[in-house]
Amino acid sequence: MILVTGGAGFIGSNFILDWLAESDEPVLNIDALTYAGNTENLASLAGDDRYVFVRGDVCDRPLLDSLFATHAPRAVVHFAAESHVDRSIHGPAEFIRTNVEGTFTLLEAARSHWSNLPDAERQAFRFLHVSTDEVYGTLARDDAPFCETDTYEPNSPYSASKAASDHLVRAWHHTYGLPVVTTNCSNNYGPFHFPEKLVPLMIVNALARKPLPVYGDGLQVRDWLYVKDHCAAVRLVLARGQIGATYNVGGWNEKPNLEIVGTVCALLDEMQPHPDGSYAHLITHVPDRPGHDRRYAIDARKIERDLGWRPAETFESGLRKTVRWYLDSADWLARVQTGAYRQWVSANYDQRGA
Ligand code: NAD
Ligand code: DAU
């Protein structure tokens, strides 16, 4: 079996659903179920004996040791993290704990398990670390996209904590020989995305006829990738990635935020028109994110050349599927907008006047 961390979050739950749709190899999911973890994402696996869930923290070494001893996974796919840049600005401590200390603890538990395996299993073992393009910092308009050999220049507490975790993973390979691979991916969007992030927040607010808060001038650029394409890349890197290597994963799809929000509004206008007129009228510019990175772009030629990965979805097809999913998932959306969610929205947006 494989051990997945953070499998109740956005990307992790898509990964597990796709994994079990494509293979019969069981999955052990360890997730602390923070505000971002939601077992409902995996409700379709109820009664499936290929899926085991353990509520637990990646900082809990005794728990990790006992899970490695009991289940003897052949690989670890490490998604668990604090993932939201704005939350890292409001409260960085949890990002250091989970992203740095948690990755360290998981690496040590994996190393202890791996070093006691028989030769063949030791060679086959993999530790796949899921990371982000944000570790490379920000790009000017005409800079070349990020490639794997670029220097790390993280700018937010979130990206600094992910950069630290990438360095630990690298060092555990270099020093101890742990067979690691790392992926650095751009902005995902798709089903089960928690509505604190740009795309789902805009959908949720638009449907509630609330302002659509665009930070600053809205001309910051991100590269966007449909989550299932990211999951396919992770499966491929796990199967065939070179030990010790890193792979940049992206959609060749750079867009300014205002265009993303405009496209979401246009899709909603088409799929669920509102009598008061276009959702785009709700767009509101609000004070910017401190230290806001201006542009990210990914050079994904290495993973394409070495492993044959290309995204299957275009931005248009992926975003259409995503908006459809949210329109069809009103119950899921209502249930994730708990009191804690409303507190976060108030903490991040009231001061911005939105
Ligand atoms: P998410 O916030 O939706 O999910 C994170 C999951 O980790 C949640 O289920 C949460 O309960 C769990 N978790 C948090 N702290 C934990 C702990 N201490 N122990 C165990 N579980 C814990 O995040 P996501 O968007 O699914 O991102 C998953 C990974 O992918 C992260 O490592 C993130 O840095 C990386 N990533 C995300 C994106 C993106 O666009 N979302 C892009 C590139 C890379
Ligand atoms: O690049 C990969 C990263 O993408 C991942 O590592 C992170 O985990 C993930 O959260 C995401 O980070 P971003 O900061 O790019 O995503 P977010 O959805 O928070 O914001 C996308 C852009 O939209 C960013 O430029 C900020 C802007 N934005 C965001 C929110 C929430 C707004 O203008 N208004 C908003 O209300």
Image: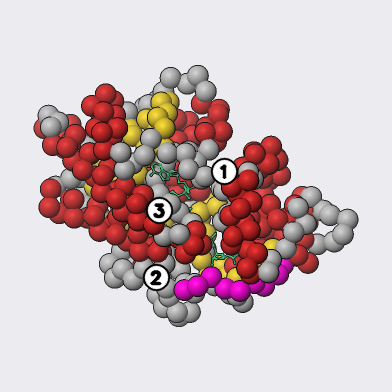
Indicate the amino acid at tag 3. Answer: Glu
Indicate the amino acid at tag 2. Answer: Asn
Instruction: Report crowding for label 3: few under 14, some 14 to 19, many 20 or more residues within 10 A (C-alpha).
Output: some
Q: Nearer the viewer, residue 176 or 243?
A: 176
Q: Nearer the viewer, mark 2 or mark 1?
A: 2
Quadrant of the image for the C terminus? bottom right
Instruction: Report crowding for label 2: few under 14, some 14 to 19, many 20 or more residues within 10 A (C-alpha).
Output: some
* Residue in the image at 28% along x and 25% along y: 71
Q: Are marks 2 and 1 in contact (CB under 8 Å)?
A: no
Indicate yes or no: mark 3 CB to ligand 1 under 8 Å: yes
Residue 65 position by quadrant = top left
Residue 7 makes an appearance in the image: yes
Q: Say which residue label 3 marks.
A: 94
Indicate yes or no: mark 1 CB to ligand 1 under 8 Å: yes
Q: Earlier in the sequence, mark 2 or mark 3?
A: 3
* Residue in the image at 40% along x and 64% along y: 157
Indicate the amino acid at tag 1. Answer: Phe
Q: Which residues are magenta?
A: 283-291
* Position of residue 182 measured from the top left corner of the image (x, y, whole percent): 30, 52
